[in-house]
Image (cartoon, grey):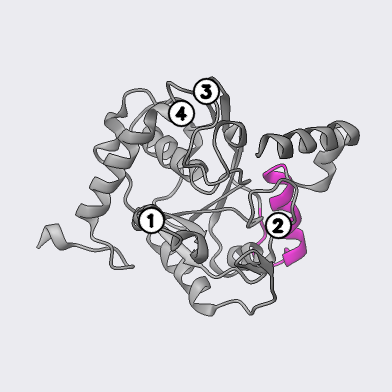
Amino acid sequence: MGLLKRNPFGHIFFLKKWLIRILGALTHRRYRGFNELQIDGSEILKALPETNVLFISNHQTYFADVVAMFHVFNASLSGREDNIKNIGYLWQPKLNLYYVAAKETMTSGLLPKILSYAGAITVERTWRAEGKDIQREVNPNDTENIGIALNDGWVITFPQGTTKSFKPVRKGTAHIIKDYKPVVVPIVIDGFRRSFDKKGLRMKKKGILQTFQIKEPLDIDYVNDTIEQIVEKVEYAIEQHPSFLKVIPQDELELQEELNKKRGW
């Protein structure tokens, strides 16, 4: 009976555990070996409650970002501080860890479907589908599923809904924060776009320093803060507010984007 125990979404714990172990072992050297993952703030994870925690992060690839988070979270909970040395932490992974992903992405092939079993909460994009801009009402079942996952454990979301930098934070994330009142933990990543292709499945370059910063939980007034105020707090926390563009001279930014296009990034 224990082998068939399932989570709230019907996923069998035994299968999910082995899937995380295998995928973790296969991907470990992408963050410690071929490239190096520099982690900061992992001690914050140990002080978090077991459930109702929402991680918000900027997004650089479809899958490599999430896989890195599974490594960092499990390593930290196993007693490692700011490192993912010795993959023994994968033996007893955190099984109530979920991530929000576009349904279109997670049904695009066999590998995404396998990765989905590791903890994806699939949602329908309300602004884009099949490469075209659309306008679609939010599916209430999607929001409900995120609530179920928060009630069961930790949830990772990418509030911009895209891998492009400095795009606006979607208001849906703010509504989830208002409705479910989770502990909101920001994460800022960098280097993944240079290391991997857009999907995060193929390594483009070795020897890249990837950075992974975990910040203190946000101070949010769930009752009095407006949706717009929460959106702004999220943008600042994940360093995607338009004001951060001023850190980089505009001509230099445009030149970098042009170079990236030529390289196929």
Q: Name the residue tied to disc 3.
A: 206
Camera-nearest label, 3 or 4: 3
Tags 1 and 2 touching, CB below 8 Å: no
Indicate yes or no whether the magenta region holds residue 51: no
Reading the image, the residue beneath label 2 is 169
* Secondary element type, mark 1: loop
Circle nearer the viewer, 4 or 2: 4
Amino acid tagged 2: Val
Residue at the disc numbered 1: 119
The spot of residue 93 in percent (x, y) is: 30, 43
Extent of the magenta region: 220-239
Q: Residue at x 33, y 35 (%)?
A: 26
Q: CA distance from mark 3 to mark 4?
A: 10 Å
Q: Earlier in the sequence, mark 3 or mark 4?
A: 4
Give the amino acid at mark 3: Lys
Mark closest to the chain's N terminus, 3 or 2 = 2
Of callouts 4 and 2, which one flags the residue occurring earlier in the amino acid sequence? Answer: 4
| x 37%, y 61%: residue | 152
Q: Answer whether labels 1 and 4 touch (C-beta < 8 Å).
A: no
Q: Amino acid at mark 4?
A: Tyr
Question: Residue 56 versus residue 62: which sits nearer the camera?
Answer: 62
Q: Earlier in the sequence, mark 1 or mark 2?
A: 1
Real-space Cα separation, disc 1 to disc 4, in angstroms: 20 Å
